[in-house]
Amino acid sequence: MKADEKSDVIIIGAGAAGMFCAALCAGRGRSVLVLDHASRTGSKVRISGGGRCNFTNLNAAAEHYRSRNPNFCKSALARFTPRDMLSLVALHHIAYYEKEAGQMFCRDSAKDIIAMLERECTSAGVVINLDCPVHRIVQEGGFTVTTGKGAFQSRSLVIATGGLSYENLGASSFGHEIARQFGLELVPPRPALVPLLFPGPAQKRFRECAGISLDASVACGGKTYRGNILFTHKGLSGPAVLQASLYWEPNAPVNINLLPDRDIYERFQDKRQSRMAVGNFLGQLLPKRFVQTWLDPSFAAWPITECSNKDLRELADRLHNWKIIPAGTEGYRIAEVTAGGVHTDELSSKTMEAKKVPGLYFIGEVMDVTGELGGYNLHWAWASAHAAGEYA
Ligand SMILES: Cc1cc2nc3c(=O)[nH]c(=O)nc-3n(C[C@H](O)[C@H](O)[C@H](O)COP(=O)(O)OP(=O)(O)OC[C@H]3O[C@@H](n4cnc5c(N)ncnc54)[C@H](O)[C@@H]3O)c2cc1C
């Protein structure tokens, strides 16, 4: 498409949501131009799921998403379900498998999903313009998008520029800036599905635990996640912590149950007459190196029989409810997603169109709908793109 030509729809962002929405709009007979400042499409999809792309989750439903309006995503999720995504993937002969709990992965490579999106776009006649930085958007009747390759015009404009993490892959705050330009409210963006940092003294203390992982349940902001936690050089990672980070706010506590399947006080009572040292006993249930660091050394050496019930009760409470107030997160550099974004009150849940700005749509991660780990974020990219793709 040449500069100054008018298309029905311009989509900014050739990622998951943008490409899918482009194919659907073009499938309805709309002329569609996709612009992206990156040199290739689907950069995040390419690295998603460790290169195998966890492209949907069979359990995709509102309770797996965080948003100021938890009901907003319901309509789009109901109209494009995980089964719809599986049908599309099967249509393109992409082999997939269920890893765990509804998480659907490509058997071979995330590149298969990108190739699928590209085929869908090509066959519907979408024009994709890469290496195309966008400088300015003006609304005058339709939209004029000024880029490094000239100005393009359209009747509808879809913003699909994703979140802020992984700047090296083309992430930018562009979508949020456009929302601000058009007077739309933003929920403050923050990194999510991201490792948490220990507060200063604990960071030093637990450094030697780096690499240890253990099964725990992690509670934060009213949600509890069960799974592995992994000690890093600065804090905690692992699936249960990454999930909990979606609900973590600065200065809020994270409560970890280190022995979620046991009543450790009862186990101490079973050993009440034992001269076994408390540390050695716990070392049978938890990684020894962790116990050595976590437990006060003088307490670790005490025989269980010499401990008071009060001591054992306090220790049991700490094991079942280890409270940490993280100093922060590892940030956008390695966050899997950006929580927050364009406030959903500003958008139609049916079409993703901005209520105040007819013709302007926001889809995917740029808006305040953030999924848990496990394929939920890509499913939101597809579902929101599908909603806009029926109307833009
Ligand atoms: C390491 C990693 C692994 C992940 N794994 C999974 C997974 O397995 N399953 C899952 O569900 N989710 C996963 N995610 C999250 C998922 O990739 C995103 O939520 C999803 O890609 C969001 O889709 P989107 O279309 O909104 O944004 P993106 O896919 O990020 O696409 C945004 C596009 O906009 C372009 N863009 C940005 N700014 C501009 C600008 N100023 N001008 C022009 N173009 C611009 C970008 O270049 C990019 O092409 C992962 C994320 C990361 C970082």
Image: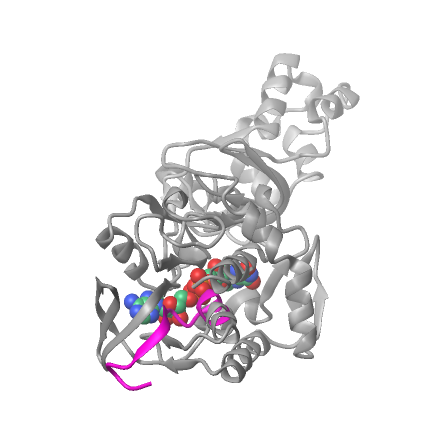
Looking at the image, which residue is at 47% across and 83% down? 125
User: Is residue 17 rendered magenta in the image?
Assistant: yes
Ligand 1 shows up in the quarter that is: bottom left
x then y, percent, for residue 367: 40, 52
Front in this rendered view, residue 196 or 348: 348
Looking at the image, which residue is at 50% across and 79% down? 121
x then y, percent, for residue 98: 72, 62
Front in this rendered view, residue 10 or 180: 10
Residue 58, quarter of picture: bottom right
User: Is residue 33 rendered magenta in the image?
Assistant: no
Left or right: 123 as drawn, with respect to 183: right
Q: Is residue 27 above or below residue 184?
A: below
Residue 170 in view (yes/no): no
Q: Residue furthest bottom?
A: 2
Looking at the image, which residue is at 64% across and 19% down? 312
Residue 293 in view (yes/no): yes
Structure colour scheme: one colour
Q: Quadrant of the N terminus?
A: bottom left
Left or right: 68 as drawn, with respect to 360: right
Q: Quadrant of the C terminus?
A: bottom left
x then y, percent, for residue 217: 61, 38
Segment colored magenta: 1-20
x then y, percent, for residue 153: 27, 73
Residue 99, quarter of picture: bottom right
Front in this rendered view, residue 159 or 65: 159
Left or right: 215 as drawn, with respect to 253: right
Query: What number of labels is visible?
Result: 0
Looking at the image, which residue is at 28% across and 61% down? 174
Q: Is residue 38 above or below residue 158?
A: below
